[in-house]
Amino acid sequence: MKIKTKVSLASVLFGLFFAGPVISGRASTAQSTYTSQIEFLFLLVVLVSILIASIVFGLLIYIIIRFREGNTNTVRKPIQNGMRLEIGWIIFATIIVVSLFAASLPATSSYFTERDDYDEEIRVVAYQYNFTFTKENGNTTTGFVEIEVNRVYMLNITSIDVIHSFYVHELSIKLDMVPGRYNIVYLQVLVPGTYEVHCAEYCGFGHYIMEARIIVK
Amino acid sequence: MSSHSSIIKDGQFKLFPLFVGIPFAIIVFIVLKILLGSFGFIPELVFLSILSFTIYLSTYDKIDYIRLIGTTNHAEIGILYILLAIVSVFIGGTLAIIMRTELAFPGATLVDSELYSVIFTAHGTIMIFMVIFPLGAGFGNYLVPRLIGAPDMYWPRWNNAALWLLIPSGVLIFTAQSSVGWTLYTPLSAELWGVGVDMWIIGVLLAGVSSLVSAINFIMTVATMRKPGLTWGKLDLFSWSIVATSIIQLCATPLITTGLALLLSDRILDTAFFSAVGFGVGSFLWQHVFWSYSHPAVYIMILPAMGLTSLMVSKFSRNEIFGYELMVISMMAIVFLGFLVWGHHQYTLYGAATDAFTTTLFSLLTSLIAVPSGVKTFNWLFTMWGGNVKLEIPIVFPFGFIIGFVIGGITGVWLNIVPVDIIVHDTAFVVGHFHMIILGGALTALIGAFYNYFPEITGKMYNRPLAWVHCIMWIIGFLITFNSMMIAGLHGMPRRYFDYSTFGNVDVLAFWNFLATVGAYLMFLSGVIFVINMIYSLSKGPEAGDDPFNLSLDEVPTV
């Protein structure tokens, strides 16, 4: 009984350790259409992780305590029928990773599917070290763009010198901006506000100052 | 005790080794200083470290340096590899401390953006090519011939050559001052002016040749020089892991060698293999070439550590390894799958204009690689089941390995969920995950192995309390540092940022970065304790004897 208490205590501790990111990490509301799907997957994968980590670390601590040298009141008998156990956790691990993969498929395909129902195209061009946005009406702005809430935009992004990456943390968007290539991502913002765009791919000494703002009205 | 190694004599560790390369390094240093004029921060740091190490070593006399240059003794070569790694890890660690100090507070505090870029490039390269690879090769050299009952390696002279190839390679890498990151994404790396990137490329090419030579040597040694009766099915897990590592090196290194040679030709001869911009083909090609080497390369880093963990867990729990066949099968599965998953570094490269098939396929394959890793973890745990676990340092470090490997592995699963990867890709989360596996996993196990073999290498026992302090500080340190980095990444801290003061949530980022810095200092301090322990034990430590850990050797595997 004592050992059981210790193990469950340890599992809880490790679980909390992993829960840290959940509680504090991405406590954002659904600000773009991608966010809710991603938040769900994130929560799922964190819960599964807590489960696995608790099992492994709980087992580690239990085994160390039970089979440590000098512990006289334990039966030291190696496991018989090891093969059954091994097949067991092969199946366990396969089921977990494959089901997580399957759970991610809808969001993946919605992120990577081309759409026709967008309202406006915005061309984003990156260069060392800034972003330029060009709207359909020809207005070009550098370092910020003003868009409307709930409208679907197609961001057609590219770069003119080296690889950059268009990263809006709060809107759950990240896409590389490759010179000579147009990458497409769709954006529908549900909450008005100002969102920061940062460059996520190392692009030179000024990488850290490369930023822009998406102003949603 | 030391019949296999003549570096050791009269219980005195003849440390000199490293540095047959030192005069060479000094000459190269002076020549480069004359040629290039100004040098900068990292080369001087390296120079000072090597100089101080030389001064320390010169207090040991009676060492036959000339013979040591040409030594073909596998144990000596192994120890030289390990010493090279120990010197390099402090250089790389100092660079890491500088980066962490810079990031502890928002704003430019210690270095500027250019120096920061140089430092993170140098840190990554040094830690990979001068620390983790040499440690794997070092323990391989030291142990494999003994484990399989061979007198030496298959090609002893090539073995020696592989070691000394790392010295010019290291000199080039240390002094290169490349500032494009260790991933060298084109077109930036193809266009950035300066001799630094060229030096870096040549240095890594040399390291690649060295690792190819030692890979072929290991495969030949294990394939042909096993003692009679030692079939593949009875081979110990460390030799298996070295074979697996060597297979990866043999198959993957030519890719990066070709890639780097073509990139060099892009830079020098103005060709356009990777700098072509039409439709982004050049940069796509580079990323595929680079990751099809560099993803298997992370298994080069982790597999020897897995093998050593198997040895140490089995030795100190005085129990047979659990599920031997499955351990070997999962190692080979890792080798095989490792070649098929490089695309998971590129989930954000394609937008909605590409079909999702490639991404999905890589995601599925990457999912599968978690299975053999998980199997190995459970088998280590159950190796201890029913055993008599002696809690000595060489098994507590493998516990750290298991902790780091599990956390790193689980966050690897997060990274493989494509939509989650889209948020955390290229943020500090990835950096934290990678370090959790390679430092928290591989390096921790390798340190444990060093403690395990220290008594028989030197004939002296290390100081146990200091070793415990090192161990606990190290494990707590890496947990704090890399978990904080991961959480900072979840808050949107991009990697390779030298300053985050313009972010909206700067206070949150500052908190987690500060915590990561605290952990980094803890680790560095524990490393200093490690060195003090080694130096102290070399001169004043008690004699180790035949069974330094009181395991009553008759009942247990002998390695």
Image: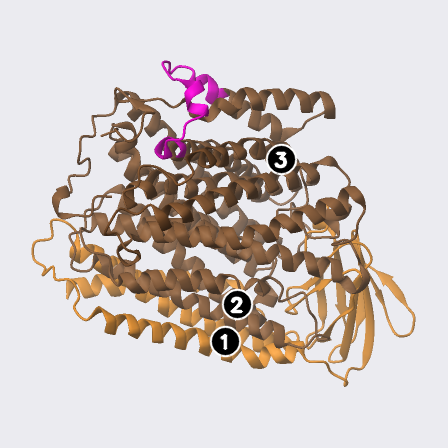
Of mark 3 and mark 2, the one earlier in the sequence is 3
Give the side of residue B426 with respect to residue B540, left or right.
right
How far apart are the two marked residues, 3 and 2, measured between alpha carbons?
35 Å
In this rendered view, identify the residue nearer to me: B52 or B280: B280
Location of residue B459 by image quarter: top left
For the residues labelled 3 and 2, say whether their Cβ atoms are less than 8 Å apart: no
Whether B407 is drawn above or below B391: the answer is below
Which residue is located at x 58 percent, y 39 percent? Answer: B206
Which amino acid is tagged 1?
Phe
Instruction: Give the residue at mark 3.
Output: B110
Share a chain, discs 1 and 2?
no
In the structure shown, which secondary structural element does the residue marked by tag 3 occupy? loop
Residue furthest toward the left?
A: A73
Share a chain, discs 3 and 1?
no
Q: Position of residue A169 (x, y in %)?
A: 64, 64
Chain of the residue where label 1 is placed in the rendered structure: A
Share a chain, discs 3 and 2?
yes
- The magenta-colored residue range is B52-77
The label number, if any, that marks residue B416 in the structure image: 2
